[in-house]
Image (cartoon, rainbow, N blue to C red):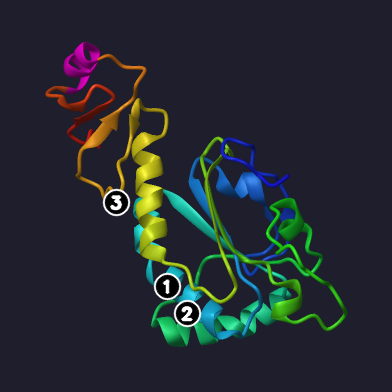
Amino acid sequence: MGLRINDTAPDFTADSTAGEIKFHDWIGDSYAILFSHPKDFTPVCTTEFGAVAQLAPEFEKRNTKVMGVSVDSVEEHVKWKSDIEQVAGAPANFPIIDDTSLNVSKLYDMLPADAYMPDGRTAADSASVRTVFIIGPDKKVRLTMSYPMSVGRNFAEIIRALDAVQATDGKPFATPANWVPGQDVIVALSVSTDEAKEKFGEVDVKLPYLRTVKSQG
């Protein structure tokens, strides 16, 4: 069975472009995003890692560390980084780990159903599908996304989802469809309307079970 929301994210030690990393120690008191891709020197992956490089200030503002996972070696990652930076026009300073052993891909159930691992495997053979894990400072999985190899990820949505996770983490709120920071949030059903008014101010009762308040962030 794959990882579920609120499972503890498996810890691991791996070599990376930033040296040896012990995952839980590396997360520390931050949020973390772990995302995989099929193989270095492939077109979609280069655009994706370029997008992450460009978004580095946004992740930093959100106290979030980002780590890439690939089935290639650190040596290949280092060579590939120059291509990423050329496409992105920004430094790719986040670590990319060496998962030639497939240890992390298997721990996080990143491989597709028909994965095949021959020698000389290609992206199509071992393709760790484009998975994303948002992990909290307590090392619990907060959110997961999986994309097929042919579909590049929307990193604006990943940032939006991270904002929603942080806005509701440990708070009696949920976010409505298409929510972005600054918009109203939904009051949890465990909080009465009177309690919500006392704690958060004006409550907009759209339905008995759908009540919103101004964003508290």
- For the C terminus, the quadrant is top left
Q: Nearer the viewer, mark 3 or mark 1?
A: 3
Task: Tell me if 177 is positioned left or right of 28 in this view.
Answer: left
Q: Which residue is mark 1?
A: 51
- The three-letter amino acid code for the residue at tag 1 is Ala
- The three-letter amino acid code for the residue at tag 2 is Thr
Q: Position of residue 23 (x, y in %)?
A: 65, 50
The stretch in magenta equals 193-200
Marks 3 and 1, how far apart in space? 21 Å
Q: Quadrant of residue 160?
A: bottom left
Secondary structure mostly taken by the magenta-highlighted segment of the chain: helix
Marks 1 and 2, how far apart in space? 6 Å
The residue nearer to you, when weighing 145 against 20, is 145
Q: Residues within 10 Å of mark 3 (few under 14, many from 20)?
A: few
Extreme residue in the front direction: 207
Residues at discs 1 and 2 in contact (Cβ within 8 Å): yes
In this rendering, the answer to whether 197 lies above or below 157 is above
- The three-letter amino acid code for the residue at tag 3 is Asn
Q: Residues within 10 Å of mark 1 (few under 14, many from 20)?
A: many
Instruction: Identify the residue shown where x is 35% and y is 47%.
Output: 163
| Secondary-structure class at tag 3 | loop
N-term mark: 3 or 2? 2
